[in-house]
Image: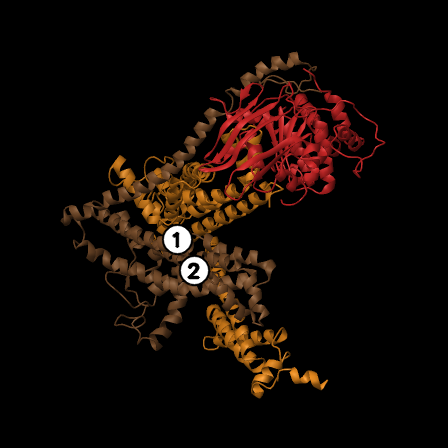
Amino acid sequence: MLFSFNTFSESEHVMTDTDTGSASAQQSSAEADDQLFSKDTGKLGDRVFRGLSFGAAGLILVTLAAVAIFLFKEGLPTFTGDQDELDNAESFLSYVGPLIFGTVYISALALLIATPVAVAVALYISHYSPRKLSHTLGYFIDILAAIPSVVYGIWGIGVLAPILSGSLYPWLDDYASFLPFFGSDINVSTSGRTMLTVAIVLAVMILPIITAISREVFLQTPRLHEEASLALGATRWEMVRQAVIPYGRSGVISGAMLGLGRALGETMAVAIILSPADGYFWNIITNSNSNTIAANIALQFPESSGLEVNRLIATGLVLFMITFVVNAIARKIANTGFSGADG
Amino acid sequence: MSRTTEYLPSLDTGSDDHRQDHDKITSGSLAGRGMLGVFGVAVVVGALTWLPFGSVNWARWIVVTLISYIVGTYAVARIVESPRQATDRLATAVVSSAFALVLLPLISVIWTVIDKGSNRFDWQFYSETMRGVVGEGGGAYHAIIGTLIITGLTALFAVPFGLFTAIYLVEYGGNSRFAKAVTGLVDVMTGIPSIVAGLFAYALFVLIDGPGHRSGLAGAIALTLLMTPVVVRASEEMLRLVPNELREASYALGVPKWKTIVKVVLPTAIAGILTGIVLAIARVIGETAPLLVTAGLAQGTNWNPLDGRMTTLPVYTYQAYKFPTLPPQASIDRAWAAALTLVIIVAVLFTAARLLSSILKPQGLK
Amino acid sequence: MNRPTISSVSSARSSPQHQQSTQTQRLQNGEANMTDSRLDTSAASAQSAAVDLNAPVDLPNRIDVADLNIFYGDFQAVEDVSMTINPQSITALIGPSGCGKSTFLRSLNRMHEVINGAYVQGSVVINGHDLYGPGVDPVAVRRKIGMVFQRPNPFPTMSIADNVLAGQRLNSRRMNKPDAEDLVEKSLRGANLWNEVKDRLGKPGSSLSGGQQQRLCIARAIAVSPDVLLMDEPCSALDPISTLAIEELMLELKSSYNIVIVTHNMQQAARVSDRTGFFNIEGTGKPGKLIEMDATEKIFSNPGERETQDYVTGRFG
């Protein structure tokens, strides 16, 4: 039974049985002629779709270039405009200096608090908890990440700050004030609206990021190395120390840098909780605190006009550059540094 | 027999102590009931912190309990078992305590939001705005509308933008320099601080409308900047999971590339893509900072995203708490109720994402 | 021109007398000697005329490949292949891993172009059209030349019936319901799958066993009425029973399609094919070449080239 050639027209039935013979074959051969040169092969659709895809990708480039350009454009008048317009006309550096200090100081503090805890939690989920539960437990940590920052902010000032200022801060003031972090000639805070409170809240906010990445990396430790360690009679902790942590080191660092980037850009928690003052403050349990760039913008922007707005945008650009560098380092470590115990 | 013992290496190589450790396969064990005992003691020790205050201080109790548990475990294990075992138990105690410690803020936040937010969890809150309201009463109706409008616009922009970029990266880009540049830039986009995204949108609209511009659309543009990279990453991952054989089967049937993508690849990946989109929405719906500098704050409902201030729930929460009207408690109550609403919305979105994922997933794929 | 009696050849192929008739042929051709243990001298002679399977057949769907060279960017994968693939027969392509046989197969329906930078020199002519001629759209080519892959790949989001119709649907061919149902039944019958799935056409394609999935893919391929059916190691992911089912199916389909199959399994090539082409490669990095192409019995019993002999006797591969 020979199948004859069928024209691919829209209306015809596709499979028709015709009788065999060379005559029909030759006729269909001519129809087949059209097939190879048929127009309905989606050329137009392909072109449109391709254009949309390339266009979207190109728009990414354009967008980021636009971000840089517009921020520059609006930030530049800070330096070129009439300085008298500014509220407190100081040099840009003396304006943004304390803000950079506050941003980096508080974020570093948050990172210091968050990273060990995050690594411990990641280890717990990957190597200590029952395997069946690990998915659910990871889910709980992800819930932490889902809570909006403004909610953390009002929780921080409404719940955490009173607790800390009622217990931890007096204790620190009594016993640790020889350290510059906990003692100075400013009184300890009674409201709890301090850099330490903010750092703890930020630590809670960035912990899920660090935990998620660390957990991924710990779970990827080659079974081979783990079993080699156990076969030597190592306890679980010794195995973790020998095989898991070295393997995951660069992943953890990368995760920590990403968390740092997040903390640097965090606005609302700081804006709500922190009691800001102008200057460089090392003491983290008082009410006089260096503000962060982001929180400063959030607080000043609604009431600002003219050159003040430009100045705020200029500080935003500074923040963008700082986070850009931090994130770039994180990516670099993630891409190149995944050696650990492997070769 | 004596012959063979000649060739056996002597076991008498170390001190008695070393030999004791080496030969000992069994030892005292702190497992099970022992651990529970240590934990129980720790709880009691923690409870001792009640004494000076005469009342329950949860935080102090839990912290002290955990610390005593850790210290106690190590001490007891060192005595009953061996130093190595003790270190191992210490590690276990530390990581478990770390996990418990992290659950504390989670529980606290959720509990607080429910507790304080329920003060204004009433019909009035969801049907009234703040127009003309000073003091008691008032609601967040306008904030909910604003959230829906701005988030809706954001999704409208970000989903096609992100999805087509992902399609480019997976189906067309290959290893070209352009694709590498785009991937790198998407990474950069992921790291933009939210306030900077807001500033950019503001600066963009200043060009069009002059300084002091406020609009819902500007807010949507800012949020698009934040949502798009999340959509790109999630979609890209899902598209890459589609086995290449399916694409080949489609090509072999003479299906053009764009139809293969639309009718074979996308439907196969749609479950994961939709989940990613819902999660991305959950992320931007709580953003405050970029909206502060673009959409601003309004007291009444604004239905026009192109012009004028538009309040969203997070901004409403911030404003009500930070700049309370008199009496302040009414304002603070409103703030918590708005926060509760936000948390509920995020929870609903998360659940929806999980449901979508399990319902839509085609069988035959892992 | 003498037309070979195709029907007699194909019926002889699928009958259990297959072994005996080919042995008779070989005896008559003087290719075997009397002491060959595989001989059964009591075999009835199915046909007296020796069929020259190498002669190009003047029927539609014959494929003439001339001086085909396949490149991936700078790398040449296949060098100077010329062959005639006769219709209504099964042609097998064998050879060691990496020798270019799959690449060559894919060039017959321009599937190799899915990889960026792939191109060919030479021509592949079917029914008077060079598939690589100017202005020819690869997508159109693939609608006339179907392909079945190594691992069964039914579309997971579609039911069994939808999978069969996929070739039509994806090309937006509208069909009314009775026609669609007809097509599904016809294709599934053609793939020997109808009886097993007729009660569950709505179930997803992935709910079938491996062998059934592969037959579903075959049904999907023949539903668009291709002229040629290419099969790239169609049984290598299947168990022996499913393999047997697919091979039987191939023999049935032979009369309707021009079938070209790439296989690692020499016994399979010997079982089902009429002609076999042997590909080989000198070393890694070198292009694959067609060493010898001839009637299957000749390739496996008395090949012309030393390399072919070494391969089919298992000296390497």
Q: What amino acid type is highlighted by mark number 1?
A: Arg
On screen, residue B239 versus residue B359, left or right, reads: left
Residue C195 figure quarter: top right
Parent chain of label 1? A
Which residue is the site of mark 2?
A250
User: Mark 1 touching mark 2, by CB under 8 A?
Assistant: no
Q: Do marks 1 and 2 both belong to one polypeptide chain?
A: yes
Q: Colour of chain C?
A: red
Measuring 41% from the left and 55% from the top, which residue is drawn there? A336
Which residue is the site of mark 1?
A331
Residue C4 versus residue A304 in the image, above or below? above
Find the distance from the CA under tag 1 to the CA under tag 2: 11 Å
Q: Is residue A267 visible?
A: no
Choose between B349 and A60: the one closer to the eye: A60
Kindly state the secondary structure of the residue where label 2 is placed.
helix
Kindly state the secondary structure of the residue where label 1 is placed.
helix
